[in-house]
Amino acid sequence: MGQEPDRKNLSSKMARVISEDLEFSGFFRILDSSAIDDDYLVGLTRDKIRWDILSIIGAETVVTGGFHISSANKITAELRLFDAVQGRFITGKKYEGKIDDYRLISHRFSNEIFKKLTGVEGVFNTKTAYVKNTAGKKDIYIMDYDGSDSKRITRYSSLTLSPAWSPDGEKIAFTCYKDGNPDLYIKDVYNAEVEKISQKRGINIAPSWSPDGKKIALTLSLNNGNSEIYTINLRNKKLERLTHNWATDVSPSWSPDGKKVAFVSSRSGTPQIYCLDLKRGRIKRLTYEGYYNTSPSWSPRGDFIAYTGLIGGKFNIHIISPDGGYSQQLTFSQGNNEDPSWSPDGRFLAFSSNRTGRKEIYIMRADGTGQKRITHGGGEKTDPAWSPF
């Protein structure tokens, strides 16, 4: 829209980001614009669009965009969504930012499109925390949901594991060995502030925030070295023990209503997924198929618990209903697939897989379709944790 040339090819880059966002959602099919002569793909506003040409290729909606690059390396972008059948304007937004923010701008408009056409919030502006292993040292990184713009947020030259987002999306809890013991920490995502929350003798691992953000469930080994599930009150640091069993109990995951906790226990002889009703104190075994089931992750919708299951010598991602009545395997015959984490809308899952020979982060739809690798480069990546917003 301005006099500056499109030297960074933002036109095609922004269109590609929006197309990939919407196509991954499973709700949209992106039409190949090469079917239309470029001369017809001009114009930002309704009166400039060639509706007759769009109808020929069967377009139901169309996105138009224009941007202006200022001398200060800034971009002003205008993006609009139209109903191509009725030739009707649906929504439009104006964004301002740095040129390097073009992906963020694109993701935000993808969310606008998704909400307008489906009625629910999109996940295209969310983040994923994960652990990257470089030369035996593990640190936590944060990236966009699609793997772009990765940033390192811990630098301890140690083992840093199990990132877990707070419900407000402002903090991440994790376990780190930097002081010699696996202690529990909380870090503010937007600054350098870090607080040690639990440093009990033995393990302080696998944090899971309560939905109200007031407590963290974790695994401690206070009972003669035996691992049990506890909660820690973040205001007064008071502990409450949830499990009492000779077996190993680990990896808690809160239900979205805060009334139950899923966890892993070896009380049946092999690691299986169990569910604890916090009010009644009742524990129910959920998984029976497979002899090694771990890493439960409760869907934000409350309808399923994702977990890692070992069947036939390979780990794969499964889901099971909270009553144990329904289960489904989502990954098959592609290496080991572990560490499931739900998107905030419960429609997608992130997970780690070594299907290429090295552990990378993947995302997929909740039915197992649309599996997509989102990390690349050196180092193994594990422990994905999808942000709540």
Image (spheres, rainbow, N blue to C red):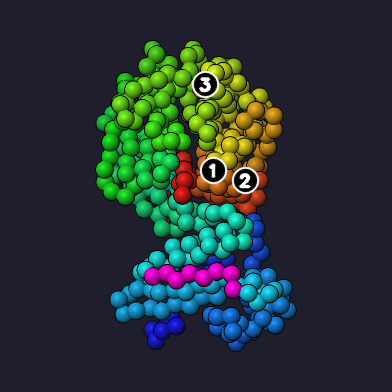
Which element type, helix, strand or loop, lies under badge 3?
loop
Percent x, y for residue 76?
40, 74
Residue 296, position in %: x, y?
54, 33
- Residue that carries the numbered disc 1 in the rendered image: 342
Residue 340, given in percent of the width and then of the height, sits at 54, 40
Q: Magenta stretch: give its range.
A: 89-96
Magenta-drawn stretch contains 92: yes
* Residue 270, image quadrant: top right
Label 1: which secondary element: strand
Q: Are marks 1 and 2 in contact (CB under 8 Å)?
A: yes
**Residue drawn where x is 48% and y is 69% of the image:** 93
Asked if residue 136 can be seen in this view, the reply is no
Report, in whole angstroms, how far the alpha carbon at label 1 lies from the one at label 2: 8 Å
x then y, percent, for residue 54:
68, 78
Q: Earlier in the sequence, mark 1 or mark 3?
A: 3
> Which disc is residue 293 wearing?
none
Callout 3 amino acid: Lys
> Is residue 280 depicted above or below 177 in this figure?
above
Q: Residue at x 30, y 76 (%)?
A: 72
Q: Residue at x 32, y 50 (%)?
A: 190
- Residue 170 seen from this side: yes
**Which mark is first along the chain, 3 or 2?**
3
Is 210 magenta? The answer is no
Label 1, label 3: how many angstroms apart (C-alpha)? 25 Å
Give the numbered dot on residue 279: 3
Query: What predominant SS class does the magenta segment belong to?
Result: strand
Q: Residue at x 28, y 48 (%)?
A: 191
Amino acid marked by disc 2: Ala
Mark 1: few/some/many CA within 10 Å (<14, 14-19, 20+): many
